[in-house]
């Protein structure tokens, strides 16, 4: 069974740093198969060739705060959005400059319900400072809108179907934190000393994932055992984007094999999830 993880970028450069990691779940655990910087422009085509893909986590906000959505509907002179598909369609028919203009006029970088409830509070999908989220959110939602509904189920907006590939939102920092691994200091740095330190931190994270079950904590014994060939491991450690994609892939394997660790979004009592989406993380491991 093939699972995947994506660290998505909304940067204009082609290719930008959009990384895809895939792995196969078998009796021995999760074996990483490939690591690629596809760029956002080629991601959908790359996914279309993965017929065995069953579950994939993507690192970007799948939607927007409900109060901004009300504002956006007013600006577009449309009724308030009732379904996520209508939101995605609206973004498909506008360019980023238009979207940014609406966001600037709204001038509130609000959080979704799920952003504030994750183990690591997530940044607003409308966040514009470094790291900028607004481009990633806009282009990410447009990507989801291109996925064939007969092939993919985008959670939580569409019903999960064993005949289709499950696509879900993941926040790698949250997953690292839940698994007791460092979630800071592994991003790219400008100076040589900082780069070396970040590289060592990425090595620690990958090693920590591989040896998760050897730490002796009973709660991790149902987590999949991770296997990575040395050549692939070097590719991952060289890039913080690849590390995030690996963590997203590992979260996919967990969601597929041990869904009991993941809170049910429909049991939190907040109907805004229908429009705002949900960050999927194995939070029950730390309850």
Image: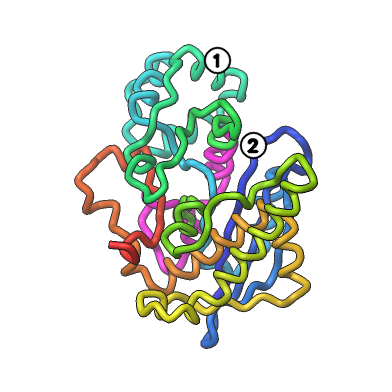
Residue, x 47% and y 42% (percent of image)? 62
Q: Left or right: 168 with respect to 211?
A: left
Residue 234 location in percent, x, y? 76, 67
Residue, x 62% and y 65% (percent of image)? 204
Position of the N terminus by quadrant:
bottom right
* Numbered disc 2: secondary structure: loop
Q: Left or right: 221 with respect to 28?
A: left
Name the disc covering residue 10, or none.
2
Label 2 packing within 10 angstroms: few (<14), some (14-19), many (20+): many
Q: Is 160 within the magenta?
A: yes
Residue at the extreme front: 193
Name the disc covering residue 42, or none.
none
Residue at the extreme bottom: 27
Q: Nearer the viewer, residue 47 or 229?
A: 229
Residue 274 at least partly seen: no
Position of the C terminus by quadrant:
bottom left
- What span is colored magenta in the figure? 138-166
Name the disc covering residue 101, or none.
1
Residue 188 at least partly seen: yes
Residue 205 location in percent, x, y? 59, 63
Q: Left or right: 243 with respect to 231?
A: left
Determine whether 202 is above or below 75 in the image. Answer: below
């Amino acid at each position: 069974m093939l699972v995947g993880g994506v660290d998505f970028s909304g940067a204009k450069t082609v290719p930008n740093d959009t990384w895809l990691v895939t792995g196969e779940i078998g009796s021995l655990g999760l074996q990483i198969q490939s690591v690629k910087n596809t760029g956002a422009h080629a991601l959908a085509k790359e996914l279309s060739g993965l017929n065995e893909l069953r579950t994939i986590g993507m690192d970007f906000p799948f939607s927007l705060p409900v109060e901004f959505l009300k504002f956006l509907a007013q600006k577009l002179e449309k009724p308030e959005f009732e379904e996520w598909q209508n939101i995605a369609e609206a973004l498909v028919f506008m360019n980023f400059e238009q979207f940014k203009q609406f966001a600037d006029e709204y001038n509130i970088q609000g959080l979704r319900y799920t952003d504030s409830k994750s183990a690591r509070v997530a940044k607003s999908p409308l966040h514009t400072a470094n790291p900028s989220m607004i481009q990633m959110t806009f282009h990410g939602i447009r990507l989801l809108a291109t996925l064939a509904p007969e092939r993919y189920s985008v959670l939580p907006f569409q019903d999960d179907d064993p005949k289709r590939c499950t696509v879900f939102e993941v926040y790698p920092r949250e997953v690292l934190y839940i698994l007791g691994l460092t979630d800071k200091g592994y991003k790219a740095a400008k100076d040589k000393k900082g780069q070396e330190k970040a590289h060592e931190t990425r090595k620690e994270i990958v090693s920590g994932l591989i040896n998760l079950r050897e730490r002796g904590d009973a709660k991790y014994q149902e987590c999949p055992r991770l296997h990575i060939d040395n050549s692939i491991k070097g590719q991952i450690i060289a890039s913080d984007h690849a590390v995030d994609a690996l963590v997203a892939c590992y979260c996919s394997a967990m969601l597929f094999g041990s869904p009991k660790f993941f809170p049910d979004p429909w049991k939190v009592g907040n109907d805004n999830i229908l429009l705002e989406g949900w960050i999927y993380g194995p939070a029950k491991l730390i309850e």
